[in-house]
Image (cartoon, rainbow, N blue to C red):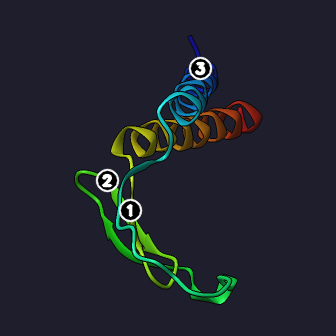
Amino acid sequence: MSLRHAGATLFGAGLLVCTVLLVTIGPIAAATEAFCPGPRRLAEFAVTGVRAWPPTLTYTDGCNEILLRPSVLWSAVAAAGGLLLAGVGQALVQRA
């Protein structure tokens, strides 16, 4: 199997798993539930924490802290890695 086929397979599998997890269990692992008076503006949303190992991401909507589910992030990282691998494989095929 060539590098681009392996990358495309990893991309497809990661995207499938990410989509299934998002639909079945949802993207949020934990969140605070504070009351926020008034409508939320887009400027109030901000990333508040990123960790590389294990991959976790937290963000705020101005009032609440939200933690994204690590399993969703793992599958998204696998899809991104597959896309990168397929791109490298395609570049090597075009070069030869």
* Nearest to N terminus: mark 3 or mark 1: 3
Instruction: Give the quadrant of the N terminus.
Output: top right
Residue at 62% in and 24% down: 12
- For disc 2, the neighbor class at 10 Å (few under 14, some 14 to 19, many from 20) is some
Foreground: disc 3 or disc 1? 1
- Percent coordinates x, y for residue 43 in the rendering: 64, 89
- Percent coordinates x, y for residue 78 in the rendering: 47, 36
Which residue is at the front of the view, 37 or 20?
A: 37
- Relative to 8, is 39 above or below? below
In the picture, measured across the screen, residue 48 lies left or right of residue 16, that is: left
Q: Secondary structure at mark 2?
A: loop
- Relative to 25, is 29 above or below? below
Residue under pointer 2 = 55
Residue at 56% in and 80% down: 45
Residue under pointer 1 = 57
Residue 9: assigned label:
3
Separation of marks 2 and 1 at Cα, in angstroms: 7 Å
Q: Amino acid at mark 3?
A: Thr
Residue at 42% in and 75% down: 64
How many tags in the picture?
3
Foreground: disc 2 or disc 1? 1
Instruction: Give the quadrant of the C terminus.
Output: top right
Residue at 64% in and 25% down: 8
- Relative to 38, is 24 above or below? above
Separation of marks 3 and 1 at Cα, in angstroms: 26 Å
Q: Amino acid at mark 2?
A: Pro
Q: Residue furthest right?
A: 94
